[in-house]
Amino acid sequence: MKSVVITSNMLNEIDQLPGWFDFVERIADAGIVIVDGGSTDGTIEYAEKRGAIVIIDNIIQREGYGPARNHLRAVAKSNFPDAHWAAYFDADERILEKDFHRFRFIKDYLTEAYDVVAFPRIDWKDYTMIIAAKDWKVNPDWQARMTRLGSGLQYVRKLHEQLVGHRKIYTSLEAPKINHFHRLAGQEKRDFIGKVCAKLHREDSQFGETYPKHHKEEHYAQLLDKEGL
């Protein structure tokens, strides 16, 4: 069997952590790694009590999402040298129990021709998972979230990170679904994330013009200039 390290970048996620750990502990057969941006709400202490390796580093704000993914892979390899995969799930993301078997099957038996597994993500508007932002079967939001630790692949770009140096990416609508609940976060948290993304887009000079601005980016850029992070 091929083991997986579950990893995440977090910042002040205490309300999400009980459910998140109940989910990831079921599939993290190597270990759990969290890089925390400096939480003050008990996230760090709770994660350590649940057995996660926690590193304090605000790498997303400083360097962006691509470097943050690379950092998580490096920490996973360093702490769990025998692990085969690293997978990344935010605090507001879940895979349902009915998909655990499929997750394990993919990680254990996927041919070595694939370095990356992309999961379809469903952007839910409610916790009962009745109303989605769009039809994931028609327009799946593919998330390249599980990577072989033995691969030399790298994530690039500070915002909307992309993969380079990999072999094939496995995609299938039969793969486990990432259920995403970001739309249900409080306004303060959503504003903070929006400001971080506006900052990173400004700084991503090498790639900044290769992807469009979010329709609210000007709003968040103005908020960033006014309030800072």
Image (cartoon, rainbow, N blue to C red):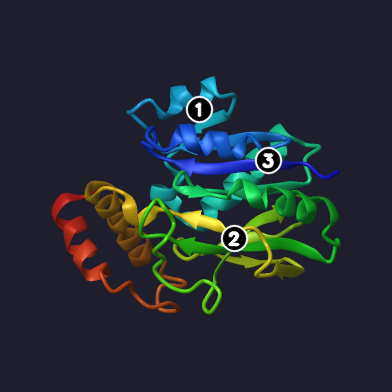
**In what quadrant of the picture does the N terminus appear?**
top right
Could you say which disc has been placed on residue 200 in the image?
A: none
Closest to the observer, 145 or 75: 145
Could you say which disc has been placed on residue 27 in the image?
A: 3
Drawn side of residue 29 relative to residue 66, left or right: right
Mark 3 residue crowding within 10 angstroms, few (<14) / some (14–19) / many (20+): many
Q: Give the residue pinned by disc 1.
A: 47
Q: Quadrant of residue 80?
A: top right
Drawn side of residue 214 relative to residue 100, left or right: left
Q: Name which residue lies at 77% across and 52% down.
A: 107
Q: Amino acid at mark 2?
A: Tyr
Kindly report the distance in space between the C-alpha atoms of the residues bearing marks 3 and 2: 24 Å
Q: Give the residue pinned by disc 2.
A: 155
Q: Quadrant of residue 177?
A: bottom right
Where disc 2 sits, the SS reads: strand
Q: Quadrant of residue 40?
A: top left
Where disc 3 sits, the SS reads: loop
Q: Name which residue lies at 67% across and 55% down.
A: 146
Q: Amino acid at mark 3?
A: Ile
Where disc 1 sits, the SS reads: helix
Q: Position of residue 9 (x, y in %)?
A: 49, 43
Closest to the observer, 225 or 191: 191
Q: Name which residue lies at 23% across and 51% down.
A: 187
Closest to the observer, 198 or 185: 185
Q: Position of residue 208 (x, y in %)?
A: 41, 73
Instruction: Name which of mark 3 and mark 1 comes first in the sequence.
Output: 3
> Answer yes or no: do the residues labelled 3 and 2 have beta carbons within 8 Å?
no
> Answer yes or no: do the residues labelled 1 and 2 have beta carbons within 8 Å?
no
Kindly report the distance in space between the C-alpha atoms of the residues bearing marks 1 and 2: 26 Å
